[in-house]
Image (tube, rainbow, N blue to C red):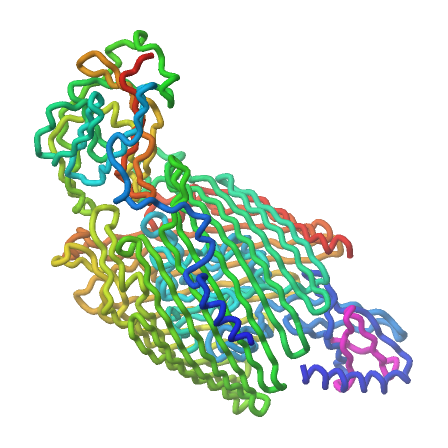
Amino acid sequence: MTMRFILLMLLGLHFATGLSAQRIISGTVSSNSENKPLQGATISVKELPTLGTVTDEKGYYELALPDNKEYTLRASYVGYNDATLKTKSLQNETLNFRLTENTTMLDQVVVTTTRTPKLLKDVPIVTRVISERDIRRGDATHIGDLLQTELPGIEFSYSMNQQISLNMSGFGGNSVLFLVDGERLAGETLDNVDYNRLNLDNVERVEIVKGAVSSLYGSNAIGGVVNIISRKSEEPWSVNLNGRYGAHNEQRYGGSVGFNRGRFNSMTNVQFTSIDAIDLSKGTDNEEVGDYSTIYGNSTLNIKERLIFTATDDLEFTARAGYFFRERDASESIKDRYRSFSGGLKGNYRITERDDLELSYAFDQYDKSDYLTPNDRDVRDYSNVQHTLRTLYNHTLADKHILTIGGGYMRDYLMSYQFEENGNHTQYTTDAFAQFDWNPHRKLNLIAGVRFDYFSEAQLSHLSPKIGVMYKVGNCSLRGSYAGGFRAPTLKEMYMNFYMGNIFMIYGNPDLKAESSHNFSLSAEYMKSRHSFTLTGFYNLVDNRITTVWNQELAGQVYTNMAPLKVAGAEANATGNYPCGISWRVSYAYTHEHIEKGEPLLSSTRPHTATARLAYDKEWKNYGLSMALSGRYLSRVTADVYTEITSYEKTVEQTYPGYTIWKLSLTQRLWRGIDLTLAVDNLFNYRPDYYYSNSPSTTGTTCSIGLSLDIEQMFK
Amino acid sequence: MFMSGTIVLLSFQACNGIFSDIYDQPSPETENEYGFILVDESSHTGRIYIDATKYTEWHYIDLHEKLVTTEPIDSKAPEKWDFAVHRYDTKTNGGTVWESSVSDFHSLPNLTTLPSESFIGDEWTTDRITIDMSQMMDGIILYAEDYYNPCLSRWLDVDTSTMPPIYTLSGKVYLLRLPDGSYAALRLVNFMNDAAIKGFMTIDYMYPVTL
């Protein structure tokens, strides 16, 4: 802010001194993709480095040139590619700039990596950002679809009872922490949060940090953190309506209303989705099509509201509330229902230019119930309620070093059908952390932090350290880090007492140790002109991973800590982005898991995965075109599978086949604010020979059509 | 101010969640009555509720005396009974069963129009009456050898081709012809209790059928 003001003053000074020459170049700077004016864009003159100006709130600028020579004007704006135009005549003239978004996102600000806003290019830990534009291109309904399309090494598959299960570079759903604007989600099913809660309407960006981040986020952040950042309302008022229709009667309808008046900024969003059951055996002669033959139909309703009140220039309050409902047609007699109620209040206070403080309270409740159609009863058998209080303080030293101190308290209540007599347990957790972000030189950044967590029921204390370093040489950034990760045993893992399907018992274990990990990461990033290349290598030493094993004495399964496990791998990412509107991205990940000799390797992490996208985006005055061809490849994998569930003595090898899936989407901007999207999924009609739980649940090529209306743009 | 407000908020009942009223409360199973829980003498109808959660029991129903007797699977049947239930399986005491296409007793066709060959009797089975599921995941299921009525047992379809199985109630009325020539109409209303635990059988009956 201060820098921009000084720049404005300096440039304004030049502008004032140049007025006497009386040759005025004027015009506007606007965004190519959204056709909105860019306020604060810088206009500079190549031949006269000391001359320049910035645009006003309408994106308008005026610049006085000292003589009648030919000059080259350059327009720059954070997050956009620079554009240059030459003066044509030797008199006053209008030069309008249309800037395209910078897809390498070097100027993108991220918050997840350090818990303070920081430029993506300056964070010392490798962070991936999926921008709003990528989200639109992906045409995804929820976070799972999006992550799989954008990042390699991520696989969402089915676990028992068609519950969705994540594998991110060898780490399961309970080892990857999902956040919405920095807040945790309550509830889980078979170790995974309800990904359907995380829809992508009004999401500004998704930030992903792979590797341990427990030094900032505590438990569960062993394999990484995925943080979904909501979009603020920027227009004075906005109304969006959207709908999408696809195969299997898949329907998605959404609407949002936003306003930004005076001290108030509000965004309300409603989304409804539904899909019929999918018969996987359709069109095949095969009676045994797979581990399951029908994918259950389901519907969701998601309502979110966020209201920001700016009390003074230095004090801001954010209130939010949300409701989520999902019904799954598990059978004619039983519908599985999932609900969440959430709310929160946050205060941000800028004490001085160098100090800011955040205080927040968050409430999240996640319920599961069975709706019994024969007697029309909706009986709840699971409820997880979390109350969280957090505080975060940042102090900037010498305008470049940042000290971050924070602490939190959480009350975690769990009632579950998996406890004895549908009982409940409560746990309290407290934490405190500190981090120092040291920037001794513009080429060097060092970050170090430590966090302490305490869990009351497990009586567990844990320290999670982190140290990261980044060094910039020319166009190259080198990063290296060590981070400790951990996951405390959950109430479910400690107290389960569940007769699984009337077949065998599963017992909790109050003596479980915390899962812990040591994560080492090295990366090199090279950026030049319109291309970027990133290479990352990582190594994780994971100990005490929590799993269930058969216990002969108890004649049931018991939660136990596993032997140490090593997860190592490498990732490569390359992008290109050209002025003609063509862009491309190829990402590849290799993951290798290694367990002690003699121990079974039960996870089915695919060693090789890749994602790719070729896109073309072009905007004209009244028409816009965006085409994207995206694909993902997952290699085959061989895992150990127990031959008997009640002895755990013998295993056999099971190979799951690899596959490649491509999607083609075409979005046309027909008129102001009207976008029509046509998509063809599974372009080459891939169909598994046998549907394993980790096979894509596709029945072949499908099409979808979507329409989005930004009403406010029609009135501009 | 902010902190104190939040702490006050935390100390409320909302600690353990909100909106619990939107759910139905399951009645504790210990308070439930079993047997002939509803009897309407004037219309000869009523409701039978059985805890058939155990794999090792037969529940014998005597429609004449309105009695349910539970016996271990390897024990003798009581002296008088008309049909019996084991989990979702059924057998009859020398009776035969016809599956109608209707879902309420009053829509049943005239009894005299029904050909007797369409009534199906019990059959001896060795792989239907499951008594031990503990090794099911390893593909080992233990069965008792016993009689089984394939027609009446169609009142609930259990599709085990997927895990977990898919349960579908037929919703149809079944006519049971007893050896004494009288008829009973039976309909399985539910196979779960309020807490969605399977094996709690709610059966509506009409006996004798006087249509």
The question of residue A595 being in magenta is answered with: no
Residue A396 x, y percent position in the rendering? 56, 87
Depth order, front residue of B195/A271: B195
Depth order, front residue of A215/A565: A215
Q: Residue at x 16, y 34 (%)?
A: B70
Disc tally is 0
Depth order, front residue of A72/B37: B37
**Is residue B15 rendered to the left or right of residue B85?**
right
Res A431 seen here: yes
Q: Residue at x 91, y 85 (%)?
A: A20
The quarter of the picture where the C terminus of chain B appears is: top left
The quarter of the picture where the N terminus of chain B appears is: bottom right
Is B65 placed above or below B143 here?
A: above
Quadrant for residue B150, please give it: top left
Residue A43 x, y percent position in the rendering? 75, 77
User: Which region is colored magenta?
Assistant: A48-74
Residue A128 x, y percent position in the rendering? 50, 69
Q: Residue at x 29, y 28 (%)?
A: B155
Is A525 placed above or below A233 here?
A: below
**Is residue A234 rendered to the left or right of residue A9?**
left
Residue A445 x, y percent position in the rendering? 50, 86
Quadrant for residue B2, please give it: bottom right
Depth order, front residue of B140/A187: A187
